Structures are given as structure tokens and as C-alpha cells.
Image (cartoon, rainbow, N blue to C red):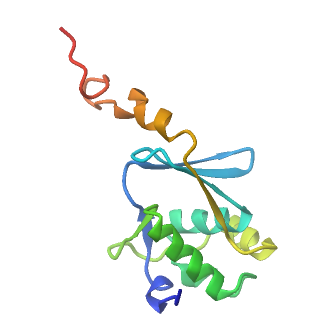
Amino acid sequence: MKVRHTVFNQSYKVAGPDIVHEEFDGDLVVLNLGTGRYFGFNAAAAAIWGGLMAGARPARFCGLGLADAEIGRFVAELADLGLILADPEAADAALPEEIRQALAAAVSAPSVESYDDLSDLIVADPIHDVDQETGWPHGIRLE
């Protein structure tokens, strides 16, 4: 896959409210509540995700240890997986120092593993379909 330069020069945001992420004991997990797929990130991938979520454009990740092509391919992969979208309205933010250090210490290319073994349970779990006003799951009527 050829990486376009525009990948490096734009800001990104999560693709929607169904995309949530959390760090557990140093491991980043990103979950798509709409499909039930979840994604495990290695250290380099987690650092790039953190930088993107902080508002930094991928160009700020270059020259910190990872090859530019690896960064570009990974950002494009996140978009292809439906986890991020370009955010043309967002300004470029500085890269937080802890992200800069994590990228400099990365020893392998960023990678993400996709899992769907729990997708039926995640999609069927009504706690994810809570109506913000009433606090009850969508589709359930109280008489």
C-alpha cells in the first residue's frame, strides 16, 4: 500500500461514539461497540494512538525512531479499520513528552491485532445502548 503524504499532514479523531479505548495494565484496547470487534495494540501502536488522540498530526511522530513508512501505514490501517477519521477542522497539537519518549523507545513496528470472539456478547449487551436522558436501554419501554 502506498502511503499518501496527506496522512501525515492532517489531524484525526475517533470515528464515532461507538469507538472507545482504555488502557489496562499498560496495554491499550480499542473497542468498536457497534461491531463488537476489539483491537489490541503493541507499544508503538499505542504511542501513535495516544499522539493522535492528543491532537498531534502524524508528521510529529517522524524522526523519533520509527520509519515514516511504518507510521503512515499504521495510520492508514486505523482509518481502514474504521477507528479514526480525518479531522480537517482540528488544529495540530504538540506531541506530549510521554508519547515522544514512547515512540523513541519503540523497538518494533506499530501493529494491531483484531478480535471478534466476543462480538456477539458486546453487541447484544444493552448497557451500551443507554438513552442519555432516561438512563434506560434503547428499545425498552417502562409501563
Say which residue appears at 57% left-offset and 80% top-offset. Answer: 73
Reply above or below: 40 against 47. Answer: above
Residue located at (43% from left, 44% from top)? 33
Q: Position of residue 61 (x, y in %)?
A: 63, 80
Pick whichever, 31 or 124, lies toward us.
124
Quadrant assignment, res 130: top left
Which residue ends up furthest to the top in the rendered image? 143
Residue 119 appears anywhere in the view: yes
Q: What percent of the width, then of the height, locates residue 47?
A: 66, 66
Residue 141 occupies which quadrant of the picture?
top left
In the figure, 142 relative to 127: above or below?
A: above
For this view, does 135 lie left or right of residue 32?
left
Question: At x 73% / y 63%, what residue is drawn?
Answer: 43
Identify whether 1 is placed above or below 112.
below
Give the residue furthest to the left.
143
Give coordinates of residue 109: x percent, y percent: 72, 75
Query: What is the count of numbered marks?
Result: 0
Q: Quadrant of residue 69?
A: bottom right
Looking at the figure, which quarter contains the C terminus?
Answer: top left
One can see residue 56 in this view:
no
Rendering coords of residue 80 (x, y %):
45, 70
Identify the residue shown where x is 40% and y is 48%. Answer: 18
